[in-house]
Amino acid sequence: MRILVHAGVCLAVAGACAGSAAIAAPSPVVTAEMHGVPPDRAVQVLVAQSEIKSNINPSNIAVATGGGLLGGLMAASQNASRTKKAEALTEPVREALIDFDVDSLAQNTTRAAFAQVPWLQNATVAFSKDSSPVGKSGALDTIGASQVAFVEYSYDFSVDFAELRVVAKVEFADKAMPAAATKPEGRVNRKNLAYAQAITTIVSLPVPTDDKATNVSLWSADGASLARAALTTAFAKMEQLLPRTLALTTEDIAAMAAKTNKKGNVGGFAGRTQESPGTGETLLWGPGFVWYRDRP
């Protein structure tokens, strides 16, 4: 079973985005000054979906036809067709996972991870299934904290159904209206966030095939035992990497991205090798963490 972990971090802190100071962007690191500011930060866990989804290869018709309205409509139609087929393929796994409580797993993961972060240990943790900008904006008004740390989870299969993936987006949004915002939901626009980070954990089938239907049957076999194990493992890695991601400094990122670190490529992710102990595990910086293991 292959497992990957990717935490996306903007290279701006390492100097790659130098000169872009005029473009508003959230901080990709939580500075020491931000730890206690504000003192009443709360946490909201978000899981909008109720069942596992599938991914598709987006249509390139628009590109091939030079774009325009016709090309865009054709691409949208093809994407809709691909999505419909992928969702149909996923149905056996969805049925087998009907009693698997991802909502609770996401909440427990977040609480356990944040318990390891001293300046987040006492934060109130709420839950919602509304991850829309309007929903997040409403949370800022009702939770009763001057800043909310949103931890938004999603989970799906890769295009070929060889891998199961979980994504966690961590965003700090202030309750106070930013000067440039004209609507309340402008508070959760990326450019107005105080902090933003993402982590992706990917678990592969032990022996994936080139046939989508075969891979789906492997995931759904024995009551979806492999899918259940993959989700459990993916969230367990989230629990480990959330505190580590929140602890990153600009110096950490610069050191991990240094050219003195050997290039590596695992599971389609490329980056600089950080650790390779020879036990079937590799840790890369992509930028962002990429953790790979070639067996359960």
Image: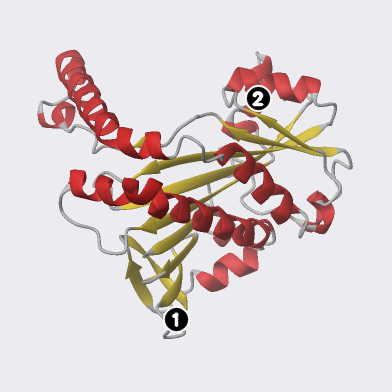
Question: Is any part of residue 19 visible from this angle?
Answer: yes
Q: Is residue 127 left or right of residue 129?
A: right
Number of dots carrying numbers = 2
Viewport quadrant of the C terminus: bottom left
Above-or-below relation of 265 to 145: below
> Would you name the residue on which mark 1 appears?
276
Residue 76, percent across and down?
Answer: 23, 21
Query: Answer yes or no: do the residues labelled 1 and 2 have beta carbons within 8 Å?
Result: no
Q: Is residue 294 left or right of residue 136?
A: left
* Disc 1 residue type (three-letter): Ser
What element does badge 2 sit on? Answer: helix
Residue 58, percent across and down?
Answer: 24, 34
Occupied quadrant, residue 191: top right
Q: Is residue 64 left or right of residue 223?
A: left
Residue displayed at 23% across by 38% down: 57
Viewport quadrant of the N terminus: bottom left
Please, which residue is most extreme toward the front here?
222
Please, which residue is most extreme toward the right here?
39
* Disc 2 residue type (three-letter): Lys
Please, which residue is most extreme toward the bottom here?
278
> Would you name the residue on which mark 2 appears?
136
What element does badge 1 sit on? Answer: loop
Residue 108, percent across and down?
Answer: 68, 47
Question: Is any part of residue 201 visible from this angle?
Answer: no
Residue displayed at 32% across by 49% down: 221
